Image (tube, rainbow, N blue to C red):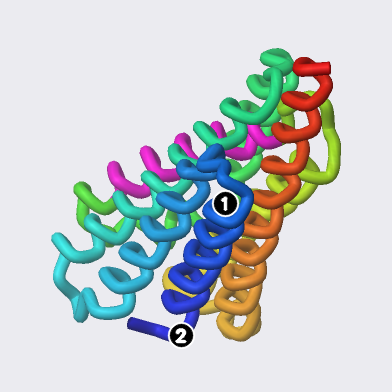
Amino acid sequence: MPWYGWVSIGASVCVGVHGLWQGNWGNWPLILALLAAACGDYFLANHAGRQSWYLAGITAFALTHILFAIQTYHHGCMHWNTIMITFACTFVMIMAWPWLPALAKVPLPLKIGGVLYLLISCLDLGFAAGRRPMDVAAGLGLAGVALLVVSDLMLVAWQFLKCAWTRNLCIPLYALSLLVMASSGPFNIHKTQKSQSTVYK
């Protein structure tokens, strides 16, 4: 397990302990998302050219995005126009980037998996941008997903476009994205408890 995989596990444990202490398990999608990211780290760090392991890593990270989108939906109202505009604009801008010729030699299953992962990650970013109200928890969630998408793009640029300068940035940005996403959890619980106390009054 690489060191950034342990960041995922440690962050999930912290979110879980905080939820246990508060008696609130509303952050279960966030905990599972962080654990899925750790699984993705393990598969990608140890794939050693094995296509099945690479696809398993991509699948685990796609699950991370799906679970965090569930977390976002669970803790806020959705502004669907913002979601779709963010999703469409992000997807088009990424696909317009001049790296497609460099991916010509990538095996077809990996291409399909990459495009599906891109669709899911852009949709997750759309959900994070469309959450209302845009409070501290929502802002941290949006920042975390945005950092994760950027780190993914830097990883692709390093692996396939041979951009050496992105190599030293993609992993720290990825680890930071996990910590920012995890930090949104306690604010979600505080918000839930505050709304419940208001209802009971």
On screen, residue 57 versus residue 161, left or right, reads: left
Q: How many marks?
A: 2
Three-letter code, disc 1 = Gly
On the image, numbered disc 2 is attached to which residue?
A: 3
Is the residue 27 above or below the residue 73 in the image? below
Q: Quadrant of residue 135?
A: top right
Q: Residue furthest front?
A: 201
Magenta residue span: 111-128
Q: Position of residue 180 (x, y in %)?
A: 69, 60
Instruction: Work out how far the residue at label 2 is from the one at label 1, CA to CA, in angstroms.
Output: 25 Å
In the rendered image, the quadrant that contains the C terminus is top right
- What residue is rendered at 37% in x and 70% in y? 41
- What residue is rendered at 47% in x and 35% in y? 119
Viewer-nearest residue: 97 or 120: 120
Q: Position of residue 2 (x, y in %)?
A: 39, 84
Q: Is residue 153 visible?
A: no
On the image, numbered disc 1 is attached to which residue?
A: 19
Is the residue 151 above or below the residue 124 in the image? below
Main secondary-structure element of the magenta-colored stretch: helix
- What residue is rendered at 62% in x and 27% in y? 88
Q: Is residue 186 magenta?
A: no
Sort mark 1 into few (<14), some (14-19) or many (20+) by Cα contacts within 10 Å.
some
Judging from the image, what secondary structure is the residue with disc 1 in? Answer: helix
Sequence order check, earlier mark of 2 and 1: 2
Q: Quadrant of residue 125?
A: top right
Q: Position of residue 171 (x, y in %)?
A: 56, 77
